[in-house]
Image: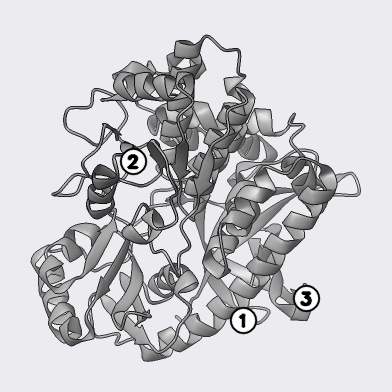
Amino acid sequence: MYDKIDIDSLQTILHNRFEGGFLTLRDLPNPSLFKDMSRATARVVDAIKNREKIYIIGDYDVDGVVSTTLMKLFFDYIEYDVEYIIPNRFSDGYGLSPNVMERVGDCDLIITVDNGISAYEASLICQKRGIDLIVTDHHLIPPKLPIAFAIIDQKQEECSFPYPEVCGAQIAWYLIASLKSALSIDINMIELLELCSLAIIADMMPLLHINRAMSIAGIKALNSSSRFAIRAIKEHLDKDILSSEDIAFFIAPVLNSAGRMDDAIYAVDFLLSSNIYDARSSLQKLIKFNELRKDIEANITKEAISLADDSDDVLVVVGDDWHEGVVGIVAARVARELEKPCIILTSAKDGNLKGSGRSFCECNLFDIVSECRESLSKFGGHSAAIGLSLDSSNLDSFKSKLQSIYKSKNYKNDVYDSEIVGEIDFRDISFEMIELIREYEPFGMANPAVKFIAKDVEILKVDTMGKDAQHQRFALRQNGVILIGVKFKSSIQVEASDIVDITFHLNENNFRGEKSIQLFIDKIIINYT
């Protein structure tokens, strides 16, 4: 299934991922290419000059938190007071909603960031109250657009911005760039990119074209940042240099945890920390949220797997009183474990079922569920992740139609790991190959971390490691070459002398000045023949 690979063929594969070339910040398109950018900019400038009351409405994920923070930093820079609201996942629901409008006081202008494209009902309230609405969003365009003074969303057909996959924070950054020009102010846009890079990676944007350029520049700025929140993160991780992996596996989950477990305003407060003491304290609060999130998520995932009907092509699992803040992560865990698209639902306060779905392999979950809209109360998302709610009386018909639509799409049933670049022999693994891989960082969507498969590997030794012995360490041999492999959160039952196939990423391990090659193992497949 997988071609044999060496360092030369690997370089060709990685280079071919970037058909559009390797862009830099000099290649960023002009803000005016966004539909309504000039119109929105002029309206904000007028509001500033006329001392109008402005509200910023964000979202409770990393992208929304960062977008809100960027806008607040901009207005702080020009010494202009604005109010900002992050909707509460549990009491407000998503985005600019009628519930959120109840929290908006007297104002003249609302600017949404990372939401608003589906806020039709709230836009009617704005219209009734004489509030101008500027929507900045990056999500798919719904059938009914909000009534707004300006809508900046690159997915609009009339928009000439050349890159359809950018996140909300990038659009907020572009709005600030446009305002900088219109107001002739000297704000450092590179410094703002350090926060923008968090959102690009956390929101799983394809790390190609301008996304790669902006995230590389942002991570570089991150590592020379004097921002107190970033200093607190570096202290906690005991690192001078942060990587895209640190963003994906520590910073993003920690920032997300506030909105999942309580209120995302804690994450905004952390990023806006005005001294190192507040930053440290806020970070510890977020870390506690994240630890709680992990515990709840692990318990629900275990229960969801036990309830899943593996005969279905698209898993739909319903639980009583499952925490709404973690159902999206649980859906991703179950989809990966059972290797099928998965939707996790739980009872909401309004009596409906509410939840999230995650795709698997080539399945476009958004398209499939879109054809079931008549069964749903609310629905949104993209190809790999959706959010939805429905009346419990529609559950059976929804599940039935979902399976039928999936079958009609003729998706391939064989599980092929598209992230595996090829089959490699231990003899071809080298420090030079690790250096080559680093040249193509950061990794993420559309530029996945380089994963290999090695076959007929002999296990020489197995040890446990870490807290509660939750990780495993292996000594592995293939064709006379011995390498050390680590598998995190694993208790797979294998023994010395077992012959296995493994999928893994390469890592350079530095311990007391000694460098060694280490395999981060993804899967171990025991050969029983």
Residue type indicated by callout 2: His
Residue type indicated by callout 3: Lys
- Residue 166: x and y in percent read 38, 36
**What residue appears at the point 79 percent right and 56 percent down from the top-left corner?**
281
Residue at image mark 2: 138
Residue 405 appears in view: yes
| Spatial CA span between label 2 and label 3 | 41 Å
| Spatial CA span between label 1 and label 3 | 20 Å
As drawn, the residue found furthest toward the right would be: 512
The quarter of the picture where residue 137 lies is top left
**Position of the N terminus by quadrant:** bottom left
User: Looking at the rendered structure, which numbered label has been put on residue 494?
Assistant: 1
- Residue 22: x and y in percent read 46, 22
Residue 206 appears in view: no
**What residue appears at the point 34 percent right and 25 percent down from the top-left corner?**
40
Query: In the picture shown, does residue 372 fall above or below 66?
Result: below
Residue type indicated by callout 1: Val
| Spatial CA span between label 2 and label 1 | 46 Å
Disc 3 is placed on an element classified as helix
- 461 left or right of 324? right
Specify few, some or many for label 1: CA neighbours under 10 Å numbering under 14, 14-19, or 20 or more.
some
- Residue 191: x and y in percent read 64, 26
Does label 1 or label 3 sit earlier along the sequence? 3
Residue at image mark 3: 467
